Image (tube, grey):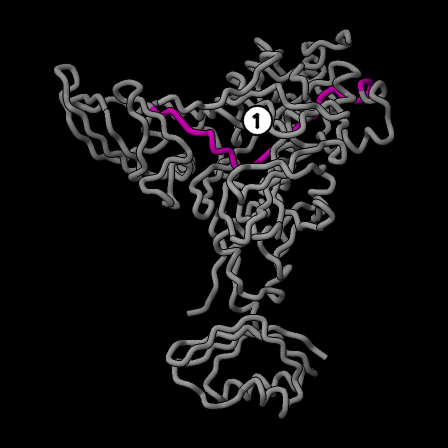
Amino acid sequence: MSRKRSIEEINEKIRSGKAVVLTAEQVSAMGKELTPAEITRRVDVVTTATFGPMCSSGAFINFGHSSPPMRMERLTLNNVPAYGGVAAVDAYIGATETAMPYDSYGGAHVIEDLIAGKDILLQATAKGTDCYPRTEIKTFVNKNSVNEFIMFNPRNAYQNYNVAVNSTSKLKFTYMGTLLPLFGNANFSTSGELSPLLNDPDLRTIGIGTRIFFGGTTGYVAWNGTQFNTGKPMNVSGVPVGNAATLALIGDAKQMSTRFIKAVYYEKYGVSMFVGIGIPVPVIDEDMAHRLTIRNSQIQTNIIDYGSGNFEVLGQTDYESLFSGEIILEGKKIRTAPLSSVKVAREIAEILKNEITEGRFLLTEPVALFPKTSGLNKLEIRI
Amino acid sequence: MTSKRFVLTFPPESTGEPITYNLIKRFDIMVNIVKADVSPGKIGRLVMEMTAPAKVLKEGMAYIRQQNVECEPIEKKIHCNEELCIHCGACSAVCFAGALKMNRQTAELVFEPEKCVICELCLKSCPLNLFSIDID
């Protein structure tokens, strides 16, 4: 389908304060009454958002050089190990890292504490070199003392995700929350019709370089996310059934807010981090308008057994049922619960809508689009 | 008639009194034991729903307390730091008693502590560790 409007045309309307911006939920409701052609005429930008646990997250930090200088090799932040094999005083702290297995304080907490402006204990050791003679250091750092504090998340904003149930007779503690025995509950984790990649399922407007709301500030799409998978079957509404595309995101963590970056701990699983993401989708043509009207009833996902260990697909359901509080699997009613916060996702979509409406946030044309075909490799045991 | 849930905390030494029997026979209170953990020599806990006219319930509570047994409405025993809640819903997944539910319209957590049965699953399920139970 030919493009009807360019990003630049839409940006011109934003600059002049004339852009009509709605949230994805508002456009989904609008889609019941209006045709895509009418929506294209009336709406310029649609804001999408999500706020859920995203393990594949972390931050690069440059601590600055001490005197005498040091090439930090093994280092911890509040006793949580960070990866020091980058350069002398660069490190990457992963959100899920912990000092000990099942510790409830981890990398995500370090990141949240840094964003909050707290002092963090940095301890590092090194062998010492002629150019970096120091062999150990113990000091406090905070977001103002470090040079850069850059959040870089390799895999965020999953396009759709599984529903987790537990077929066994035992309580299971998973990254999909606590699963009651014998199908006692079903947990799911997306914001449904508000979710970014479900509103642009073919990734026509979201690509490398897309400007987004990220953790309370402006961020960018850096690349496709890891485990980016275009091979999932599409349903009749043109959205993938199950976890498919992902985004790698980057942004200045110094400017982020603990309202939209939140460390969490899942019992007997470990630490993860809630990440607040908002992505504006320009209504470039009727096809895009049609995609943006997607409703929870039109999005299906797989129900998967997280209890037995073999992740068997047991059935399918849709997000209207999931958000209703009950699904039916093989004739049995199962109580449902979300794990990602639609309340905060709505807040993000509203913030982004206001930023665009008031001309403070302009849209970007992707520098490059994502691969059209990409599958997943398995890890073979070859020894 | 009023129905209310209470947490009864028994001292380690046995009271010697058939408290539940007396509540039924002497006060005509409908008693539903929701959870029981009572052993001689240990602090015991009974979660009980009592149904009776409000005045009779009051008399029953006074009788329980006379036996050196603590009797508190359940909502005074379970706490959620709601100010810090992000409304993810993970606690509602495990609350089979229906004390923790998501409001479909607002997507907010609704906490009704009077429906709690002190199963304690929310304590482990909240990823922000916002629940606490005020029981020894």
Q: Nearer the viewer, residue A168 or B75?
A: A168
Q: Which residue is mark 1?
A: A213
Q: If the image is split into quadrants, where does the N terminus of chain A sit?
A: top right
Q: Is residue A57 above or below residue B123?
A: above
The percent position of residue A227, horizontal first and vertical second, equals 52, 23
> Which of the chains bears the disc numbered 1?
A
Q: If the image is split into quadrants, where does the C terminus of chain A sit?
A: top left
Q: Is residue B70 visible?
A: yes
Residue B9 horizontal side relative to residue A145, left or right: right
* Element marked by disc 1: strand
Q: Magenta stretch: residue A51 in it? A: yes
Q: Is residue B60 above or below residue A183?
A: below
Q: Which residue is at 77% across, 16% downward?
A: A287
Residue A71 horizontal side relative to residue B30, left or right: left
Q: Which residue is at 53% across, 43% downward?
A: A308
The percent position of residue A199, horizontal first and vertical second, equals 69, 25
The percent position of residue A105, horizontal first and vertical second, equals 38, 43
Q: Which residue is at 48% across, 39% downward?
A: A262
The percent position of residue B100, horizontal first and vertical second, equals 61, 56
Q: Nearer the viewer, residue A195 or A231?
A: A231
The quadrant where residue B112 appears: bottom right
Q: Nearer the viewer, residue A113 or B73?
A: B73
Q: Is residue A50 above or below residue A179?
A: above
Mark 1 closeness class: few <14, some 14–19, many ≥20 residues within 10 Å: many
Q: Nearer the viewer, residue A236 or B69?
A: A236
Q: Residue furthest top?
A: A2
Residue range corresponding to the magenta coloring: A40-61
The quadrant where residue A143 appears: top left
Say what amino acid the circle numbered 1 marks: Phe
